[in-house]
Amino acid sequence: MHRIFISSVQKEFVAERRALKDYIQGDPLLRRFFEVFLFEDLPSSDRRVDEVYLAEVDRAAIYLALFGQDYGSEDSTGISPTEHEFDRATSTSKERLVFIIGADDDVRHAKMQNLIRKAEAQLIRRRAADISELSASVYASLVEYLERSGDLRSLPFDTAPCRGATLNDISDEHVRWFLTEAQQRQFPLGENTSAPDLLNHLNLLEAGEVTHAAVLLFGRDPQRFLPASGIKCVHFHGTEVQKPIPSYQIFTGTVFEVVDQALDFVLSKIAQGVGTRERGVQAPVDYELPRDAVAEAIINAVAHRDYLENSSVQVMLFSDRLEVWNAGALPPTLTPERLRHSHPSIPKNPKLARALYLTRYIEQIGTGTLDMIRRSAEAGLRTPNFRQDGGQFVQTLWRPLAAEGTLLGTPAEIGTKSGLSRDQVEILKKCKEETPLRDILALAGRSNRTKFRDQVLRPLLDAHLLEMTVPGKPTSRLQKYRLTKNGTVALASLQKNEKT
């Protein structure tokens, strides 16, 4: 049995902790593998409380924390039992599952905010609005733990047989194309190899049955068996999701075809310039977003998505950024921050990843995010952003209008080259005087503080049009925003242009 230690501020989430224990012990699968410890179930003892709960952390295989608004009582060093528990679980290399309860970070105790940031720097944490959402997230995390520990044994999705599919559903044309392309990687099979021989060589048959990977790579109609395996592409003129939508398309086909179509969709919507023929007979085309970085983002989403989820990969182009969403979470050993540095390749769909490598869609397995960062830097763009948003992994590439210091060209050019949304213009007007975030949120009619900071405020800050009054503490309750000198010039230019 695997022992779970459930941690939180003792007076907070009493009902939730009890409900979570009852849920785990009542589930037919989880109760076979887990037992749950709650501090309140301990009998009276003359042992020191801190000794007891730290000893229980040591006994547990899994540390499960619920972080809310309160920080809890503090000892002589100013540290709460909750933080001591987290630190002990970290130092003893326990499996740590952290769940953030509630969406409004600004109402949390300052030390709880710091504890959440500490957890974010080390592992993936998830948010939950209620006990139903919390139970579902805990279930998924515990099943994943059982799979990694070997207690549950199942084939990876792309290796499992695709129900109803046969060799007749494999396209000879797609097989021929793959064999031709793979020759660039010194692939050992010739271009006339039969479909069954290719699938056998790539281990895409399971006990003679066609696998999901075989259908996604070579199927005549992959969406017949896997309806959500296409890519949804959307183009918005502003910085937010809002109707009417100027352009919306769903692309279908093999993984190679949907990647190509989604890439063409993005490139057709962004600015491009044609260079000189100094480097060759053909004049080069340079896009405002590096083509290879866009391709990497789309390929990453296709290769690493969770195909058991019913949501498709989504490619969303805004006026200031490109976002690529795919269902699934990073492996426990990886975090969004670690993707910015050298890291191991842990493909969720290894058969798909290998085929993409053999056809040179992936140049080096495990370097995709680093290539995106490098190519964005070479183009003078902001560093790409990676984040986990619930059950979705999100990659963001910033367009030139959102690059540092070049949001609008020079401040005086705002009237003719404005890349600002209506909300951003109103914010500049509001911030002639120092303005707290709550007033800016009310002005824009928004409630999600984190998303609002990232998508609306961050480009203004990076372009030096706005500044914080407390720059060293972005989430300080005393934080306000005000125009910079550049912002004053830009706003004056915009207002002059509005009058004319």
Image (spheres, rainbow, N blue to C red):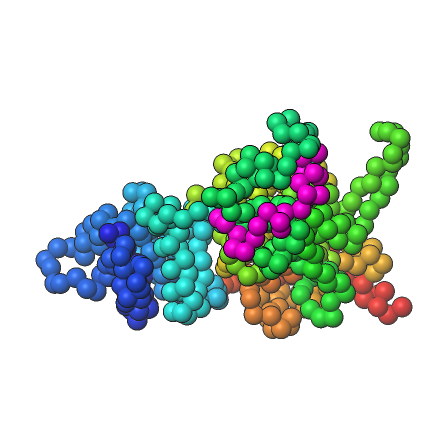
Horizontal side, residue 35 vs residue 359: left or right:
left
Q: What residue is shown at x 13% (from left), y 63% (from top)?
A: 43
Rendered position, 437 above or below 274: below
Q: Position of residue 114 (x, y in %)?
A: 42, 54
In what quadrant of the picture does the C terminus appear? bottom right
Residue 396 visible to an observer of this rendering: no
Q: What residue is shown at x 69% (from left), y 32% (from top)?
A: 191
Q: Position of residue 393 (x, y in %)?
A: 55, 53
The furthest residue to the left: 46
Residues 313 and 71: in front is 313
Query: Which residues are drawn in magenta?
Result: 160-180
Tell whether position 43 is magenta: no
Q: Quadrant of residue 486?
A: bottom right
Residues 232 and 165: in front is 165
Residue 179 visible to an observer of this rendering: yes
Horizontal side, residue 248 vs residue 47: left or right:
right
